[in-house]
Image (tube, rainbow, N blue to C red):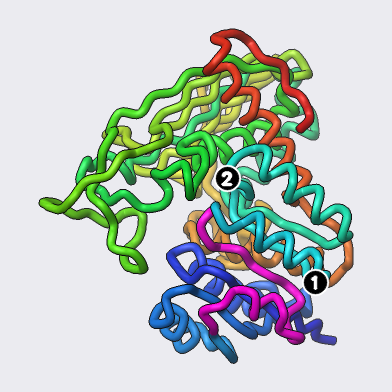
């Protein structure tokens, strides 16, 4: 029997279209789940963008008033893909209306807003989910299985990073992502949130941190409201100030004794989207890089020493969710496929009435770490992770 779930999406920029496309594919890719997403209404302050999304993805309605998305009686799930500055108000309204919430990371503009959003949702007893999509790569889920099975022995150290060159061009426009007023944190919230979530999933909770930051490109061309993306480029026009950080580097100690480093940068030259980790244990090691998303490097100390080093393994139907997209090994998935898996995981939790991961609880755990990192910029010393 089909379980139809009415969906309203708020914010029809790049990420709003990614989510809408993902919902459309859930019933195809995960036929046996019995879940039928129904795109009810999309909202965007730019009317033309909302109407384009309605026509493109088949929403029954569109609006320039996000409150109408939440008030729509056919909407069971509210998907927040608007700028970070709007997340708190939208999430509060959705929770008060009893709607389940999917929100893009880092949920709030800053750790304190994320904590407030998590509290609001918990009080309202609504189900939540967060866009930490990199964790859904089939070989990443396989890595997690290997660690839980003890195949790496006792974990000893971890290195995580997200090097994305999307802002490396100094003519890249001053979108809301570069302004503390609208985005809150810069690279710490945008990229490091992914790094911390992955570290939590792979290596475990973090105990203490010490970090630094830098803004390498202090001014950017002003953006044209309602057009383009964070990747848009402009030259020759008026400039504005970048008010949050381009780079973050962190030393970390985990609660289980693992030592490591975390690093993220949005203006780096060379890497384009290098969301990556290496984890080492007493019996082996694992290395993964999103730029080569469909392969993973494995090393086990019990292997024949003549092989000496990592073994390359390709994503295949024996790895979680791969077979829902491709029947054979080496037939790769892409970024949008991870968002489909993510959408399915969320809707499955709604259909079952059970909170899934990652929800606002996991986002709050990330926010606690981000708050400690930000504090260490001021104190210049190790800071313990404390609950907000």
Residue 94 in view, yes or no: yes
Q: Looking at the picture, how far across and down is residue 303, in whole percent? A: 63, 22
Q: In this view of the protein, which residue sits in the foreground, 245 or 252?
A: 245
Left or right position of 323 against 182: right
- Highlighted magenta segment, given as a residue range: 63-84
Residue corresponding to mark 2? 109
Name the image quarter holding residue 381.
top right
Q: Looking at the picture, how far across and down is residue 359, in whole percent? A: 75, 51
Name the image quarter holding residue 340.
bottom right
Real-space CA distance between mark 2 and mark 1, rounded to the nearest whole angstrom: 22 Å
- Are there few (<14), some (14-19), or many (20+) residues within 10 Å of tag 1? some
Left or right position of 195 against 149: left
Q: Which residue is rendered at x = 56% and y = 68% of the image?
A: 19
Q: Quadrant of the C terminus?
A: top right
Q: Looking at the picture, how far across and down is residue 272, in whole percent? A: 34, 43
Q: Is 142 included in the stretch rendered in magenta? A: no
| Mark with earlier residue (2, 1) | 1
């Amino acid at each position: 029997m089909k379980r139809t779930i009415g969906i309203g999406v708020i914010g029809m920029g790049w990420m709003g279209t990614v989510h809408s496309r993902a919902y459309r594919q859930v019933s195809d890719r995960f036929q046996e789940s019995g879940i039928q997403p129904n795109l009810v209404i999309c909202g965007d302050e730019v009317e033309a963008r909302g109407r384009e999304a309605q026509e493109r993805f088949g929403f029954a309605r569109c609006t320039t008033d996000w409150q109408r998305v939440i008030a729509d009686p056919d909407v069971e799930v509210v998907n927040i893909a608007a700028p970070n500055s709007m997340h708190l108000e939208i999430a509060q309204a959705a929770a008060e209306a009893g709607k389940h919430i999917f929100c893009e990371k880092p949920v709030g503009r800053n750790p304190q807003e994320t904590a407030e959003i998590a509290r609001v949702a918990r009080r309202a007893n609504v189900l939540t989910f967060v866009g930490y999509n990199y964790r859904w790569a089939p070989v990443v889920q396989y890595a997690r299985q290997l660690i839980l099975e003890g195949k790496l022995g006792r974990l000893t150290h971890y290195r995580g990073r997200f090097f994305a060159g999307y802002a490396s061009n100094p003519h890249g426009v001053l979108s809301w992502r570069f302004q503390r007023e609208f985005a809150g944190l810069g690279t710490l919230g945008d990229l490091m949130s992914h790094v911390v979530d992955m570290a939590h999933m792979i290596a475990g909770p973090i105990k203490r941190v010490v970090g630094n930051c830098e803004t390498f490109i202090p001014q950017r061309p002003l953006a044209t409201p309602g057009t383009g993306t964070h990747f848009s480029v402009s030259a020759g026009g008026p400039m504005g100030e970048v008010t949050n950080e381009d780079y973050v580097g962190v030393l970390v100690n985990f609660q289980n004794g693992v030592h490591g480093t975390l690093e993220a940068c949005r203006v780096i030259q060379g890497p384009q989207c290098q969301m990556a980790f290496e984890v080492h244990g007493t019996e082996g090691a694992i290395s993964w890089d999103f730029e080569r998303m469909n392969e993973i490097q494995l090393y086990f100390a019990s292997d024949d020493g003549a092989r000496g080093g990592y073994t390359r393994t390709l994503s295949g139907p024996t790895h979680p969710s791969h077979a829902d997209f491709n029947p054979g090994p080496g037939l790769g998935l892409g970024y949008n496929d991870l968002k489909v898996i993510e959408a399915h995981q969320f809707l499955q939790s709604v259909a079952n009435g059970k909170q899934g991961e990652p929800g606002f609880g996991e986002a709050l755990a990330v926010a606690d770490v981000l708050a400690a990192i930000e504090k260490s910029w001021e104190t210049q010393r190790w800071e313990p992770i404390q609950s907000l």
